[in-house]
Image: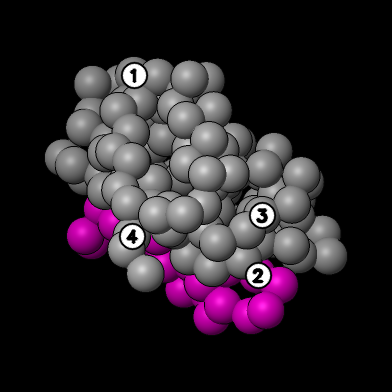
Amino acid sequence: MENISIEGTPKTPAVNFDYQKGLIEIKGRSIPENSIEFYKPMVDWLEKYASSPKEVTNVNIQLEYFNTSSSKCILDVFKKLETIHKADNKVVINWYYEEDDEDMLEAGEDYQSIIRVPFEMIEIED
């Protein structure tokens, strides 16, 4: 299975989906011109990954900002992870937020309330 590695830009996050390590990382700003187009390869990748996931899937999300259309796409990513988790596989979502960023903490808590996967809220100190 091919890994996904996308360099971050001022409008799109850096993405690293590593099959061998069972590691999924999204980091940076998410305000792409077309969120659905940007996130589709990730959702498709998770669809394939779900058929033979690693024993533990570690997910690191460290976004400094995302727009409304990205939030829907991020939810789609989490829903795929929820499917993997429901199939009795271990999925750990680490949601990173800066210590003074209440909005990002709340966004993580909102996702946590929707998705039935354990979330770790991790504060990053400036």
Q: Which residue is mark 2?
A: 12
Say what amino acid the circle numbered 3 marks. Answer: Phe
Does the stretch in magenta take in 87?
Answer: no
In front of the other: label 2 or label 4?
Answer: 4
State how far apart marks 2 and 3 are (Cα): 9 Å
Which tag, 2 or 4, sits closer to the chain's start?
2
Closer to us: 125 or 2: 125
Q: Is residue 35 above or below residue 43?
A: below
Q: Which residue is mark 3?
A: 66
The residue shown at (56%, 38%) is 107
Dot 4 crowding, Cα within 10 Å, few <14, some 14–19, many 20+: few
Name the residue nearer the viewer: 13 or 76.
13
Of the numbered discs in the image, which one, if any, rests on residue 124?
4
Q: Amino acid at mark 1?
A: Lys
Number of the front mark, 1 or 3: 3
The reply to whether the C-beta atoms of the residues labelled 4 and 3 are less than 8 Å apart is: no
Q: Is residue 122 above or below residue 125?
A: above
Q: Secondary structure at mark 2?
A: loop
Q: Secondary structure at mark 1?
A: helix
